Image (cartoon, rainbow, N blue to C red):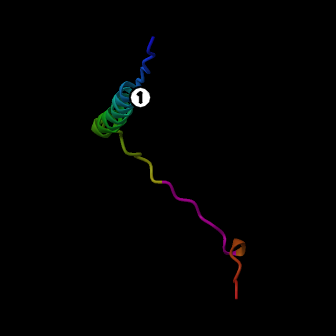
Amino acid sequence: MQFTRNTSSGKKATLLIIKLGLVVVLFFGTVFLLSKIDFPAPKKEIEKIIPNENFKIVK
């Protein structure tokens, strides 16, 4: 009786490539869809006065 060795390394590699490709496509699709959303700009100007005493001269 002769034993045969069944290896499925080729199948595992193709499944890994397909999964990685799917993750990459989903990532770029999400980035693309988020770039299409028009977020409103703030209408109020933000101004904060920083007193000069907080600055220190470093030599």
Q: Name which quarter of the figure residue 6 lies in.
A: top left
Q: Position of residue 21 (x, y in %)?
A: 33, 33
Q: Position of residue 20 (x, y in %)?
A: 38, 33
Q: Secondary structure at mark 1?
A: helix
Position of 52 compared to 22: left or right? Answer: right
Position of 29 compared to 53: left or right? Answer: left
Q: Is residue 47 magenta?
A: yes
Instruction: Quadrant for the C terminus, please.
Output: bottom right
Instruction: Give the residue displayed 36% in from the left and 25% down from the top.
Output: 11
Q: Is residue 21 above or below residue 48?
A: above
Q: Is residue 51 above or below residue 39?
A: below
**Residue assigned mark 1:** 9
What secondary structure characterizes most of the magenta part? loop
Tally of numbered tags: 1
Q: Position of residue 53 (x, y in %)?
A: 72, 74
Q: Is residue 23 magenta?
A: no
Of residue 43 and residue 14, the one placed in the foreground of this image is 14
Instruction: Quadrant for the N terminus, please.
Output: top left
Q: Amino acid at mark 1?
A: Ser
What stretch of residues is rendered in magenta?
46-52
Q: Position of residue 54 (x, y in %)?
A: 71, 71
